[in-house]
Amino acid sequence: MEEIKPMEKPKTEETERKPIFTNTLQTSREIYLELFRAMRKTANIVICVIGACFFVYACYHLVQLIRSFTYYGESFASEPAFWMLTGCIALWVILLVRVLLTPKRAVKRQMRMNQESYGTEQMGLEIAFFDDAIELHNRTSKSELRFLYPSFKKVTETENLFLLWTGQRQIVVLGKLGFDGTDAAGFRTFMDEK
């Protein structure tokens, strides 16, 4: 009696295609916070420099007010410099609060959007790197995206993440610990070549 063999699928380009790297990322509050801090890094530096300038300006006027008060014996509130000083300090405090709280607010907003859209705060992402493109599969939303390497403007690295920037606010996020069978150093070399 002849043995029946199961039919083999015809080999196509898709079944033969093996990714060079694969990465799995399960988003969390910590990952979102690190991402938003990395996105705002340049803005935070600018805000801190502006805040420092306002602080120096306010200190200069404070010294002038103290001299004026001790020399003329006038009230602080009657001096225009007092109001300038108050405004500078208030603006500096507002900028500082913005630098510290904006990433946390953005994380809360993102987690709330995930919950409303998908019923969970966390997103499961699988990213495959091929010779010509990156394919991203979102397990939570059941969506797939494909990016060609020239579409990436820059690659930045944080303590736990790689960020592949395709635009001002469009980023592919990779966890350094999420690489299957490879390490982050090998991926870094691979992206430098692309």
Image: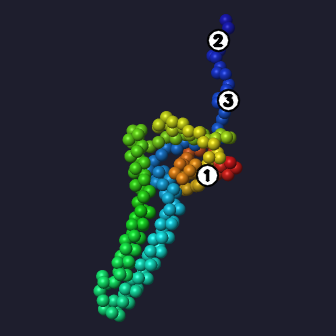
Amino acid type for the residue under numbered disc 2: Ile
Q: CA distance from mark 3 to mark 2?
A: 27 Å
154 w.r.t. 15: above or below: below
Neighbour tally class for label 2: few under 14, some 14-19, many 20 plus, Cα within 10 Å = few
Q: For residue 145, which quarter of the picture?
A: top right
SS of the residue under disc 3: helix
Disc marking residue 4:
2
Residue at x-position 42% and y-position 58%: 102
- Point out the image quarter for the N terminus: top right
Q: Which residue has dot 1 on it?
A: 153
Q: Nearer the viewer, mark 3 or mark 2?
A: 3
Q: For residue 100, which quarter of the picture?
A: bottom left
Asked if residue 176 shows in the view, the reply is: no
Q: Nearer the viewer, mark 1 or mark 3?
A: 1
- The mark that comes first in sequence, 1 or 3, is 3
Q: CA distance from mark 1 to mark 3?
A: 29 Å
- The mark that comes first in sequence, 1 or 2, is 2
Q: CA distance from mark 1 to mark 2?
A: 54 Å
In depth, the one of 111 and 184 nearer the eye is 111
18 w.r.t. 34: above or below: above
